[in-house]
Amino acid sequence: TVAEQIVSRGLSVRQTEQLIKQLADLPRAQKATRKAAERDPDIVELEKVVSRNLGLNVKIENRGEKGRLTIEYQNLSELDKVLRLLEPSQEEAAA
């Protein structure tokens, strides 16, 4: 146990705090690594294609049937570019 490690190693209060912090951070680091490894390669490729086509950073989070598409822009000009691409064309609007 952690208590046994502290006693057997004769840790100071500061060393004990550091050990506890490392142990608390371990599951988060493992979870982040596991999450990155579990990404669908098709989704990763799709992110690259959409990013390349838009010239902007794109993040796709897939959660089964649902998900989230995030498009990052640096200024209003880039936002305007994305919005223009999302507007229906005049032909589509007339139909």
Image: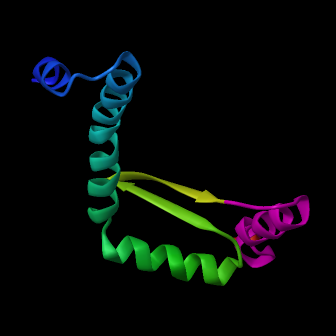
Taking the image as shown, residue 46 lies to the left or right of residue 65, namely: right
Taking the image as shown, residue 40 lies to the left or right of residue 69, namely: left
Screen quadrant of the N terminus: top left
Question: Where residue 64 sits in the image (x, y, percent)?
Answer: 28, 53
Query: Residue 27 falls in which quadrant of the image?
Result: top left
* Residue 5 can be seen, yes or no: yes
* Residue 64 can be seen, yes or no: no
Taking the image as shown, residue 40 lies to the left or right of residue 56, namely: left
Question: Where residue 20 sits in the image (x, y, percent)?
Answer: 31, 26
Of residues 91 and 29, the one nearer the viewer is 29
- Is residue 88 part of the magenta span, yes or no? yes
| Coloring scheme used | rainbow
- Is residue 31 part of the magenta span, yes or no? no
Question: Where residue 93 sits in the image (x, y, percent)?
Answer: 75, 68
Q: Is residue 28 above or below residue 93?
A: above
Which stretch is magenta?
72-93
Question: Where residue 10 sits in the image (x, y, percent)?
Answer: 22, 22
Q: Name the residue rendered at 76%, 61% in the picture.
A: 73
